[in-house]
Amino acid sequence: MRDNFPRAVPSLPKFSMLRRLCHGVGLTAALLAVQTFNTAIAAERFSYQIKSGDTLAKALNAAGMNGQQAYKVNQALAQHLDLKTIKPGQVVQVERNLEGVNDSSSFRVLLDLGFGGMAEATLVNDVTVSQFAQLVPQIRTVSVEFTVSGSVIDSAVEAGVSPEVILELSETLEAHVDFKRDFAGGEEISLRYEEAIYTYDGQRKRIPRAINAASVQTSKGLFEVNRIGEGSEQKLVISKNGKIVLSLLLPVHDARLSSAFGRRKHPVLAGWMMHKGVDFAANRGDAVFAVAGGKVTRAGREGGFGRVVRIEHAGGMETIYAHLSKISAGLKPGSRVRQGDKVGEVGRSGLATSTNLHFEIRNGKESLDPLKATTLRRLDNTPAVAAQE
Ligand SMILES: [Zn+2]
């Protein structure tokens, strides 16, 4: 399993002392040994080990960045990390005069965060062009069973389950189960999901990932949720009393369902709005797959959707994949795609508050709930659902 980009970088207190930058720090002997300023065009690399009393700015100055440049890198990385927690022994690498960049003093800064984690910022023409921090989590599987007593969410939290997991479960089962009404108390719920544990500066943050399996007893019957298969073949299967009621090929794998279809409070615009699709919270760069074969009608930017791919299927059906960070090379209107083809990568372009895939299924102008079996039956190439509603 990979999780190179935390869904939310662990929230660590911001560093406010950064503004007090160190200027004019002399070069260390170690740096002098490898520095070659006379080769302005060739890329140069410096490695600096943080010493007691150092700030990142001091290290960057020592590596040949001026105060302004060091400040920009500091600001960029402070958005992701608490730079006050930098410790002696941590290594910062600075690459200067990046290849293929038309700027004789471009920089890439890499800061080792320990546990395999890394923070990076790139500066071109004194402007920060990219930045990110990546902590490598430990992954553990959580299996938990609890009995509903009072609200489902309170019972879950008491059992050590984070509220996001119950939110995902309720969004997944929304077409079938009303989490406010369909529990009288005494019902059993069991869950299996993975949790990423990020450790940074002695703090631990647990971030749940997609539910792999769930069994939910309700007054309407027993519902089971299972995620089966790998990669472009991953499916979300829901059954009621042992009979399959939904089998959706997922457009992005291992993603949490973060928002269901229907009337929702809009996260960006004020007020209530119709949410015409479902959202999958995933990592930037995760592959997005066509859930059925068809013809591409759009592969580019479109208003609030940001970078979007629209695919037309048989019978007037359409699928929409929005907020992408990237559209697969060569994909353009008229391109034919098969079920499972990668159409792009998850991002947050357009009107999105977080990194997620907004996925829609339409029949002409009408938006349909992707989590309803009736919708899927109408989608070309989607394996028929084995039954019953
Ligand atoms: Zn959405």
Image: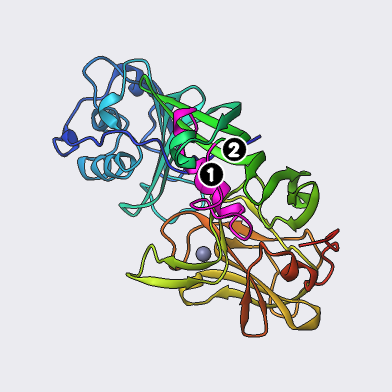
- Taking the image as shown, residue 174 lies to the left or right of residue 109, namely right
| Amino acid at circle 1 | Ala
Q: Residue at x 35, y 47 (%)?
A: 105
User: Which residue lies under the disc numbered 1?
Assistant: 184
Contact between marks 2 and 1 (CB within 8 A): the answer is yes
- Taking the image as shown, residue 206 lies to the left or right of residue 173, namely left
Q: Is residue 179 magenta?
A: yes
Q: In the image, is residue 199 above or below residue 261? A: above
User: Which residue lies under the disc numbered 2?
Assistant: 187
Q: Is residue 39 visible?
A: no
Where's the N terminus, which quadrant?
top right
Residue furthest left in the image: 20
Q: Position of residue 202 (x, y in %)?
A: 36, 19
Stretch in magenta = 156-185
Disc 2 packing (10 Å; few <14; some 14–19; many ≥20): some
| Amino acid at circle 2 | Glu
- Taking the image as shown, residue 125 lies to the left or right of residue 359, namely left
How many discs appear? 2
Q: Is residue 227 visible?
A: yes
Q: Residue at x 62, y 82 (%)?
A: 366
Q: In the image, is residue 30 above or below residue 346? A: above
**Mark 2 Cβ inside 8 Å of ligand 1:** no
Q: Is residue 306 magenta?
A: no
Where's the C terminus, which quadrant?
bottom right
Between the residue at mark 2 and the residue at mark 1, the CA separation in whole angstroms equals 7 Å
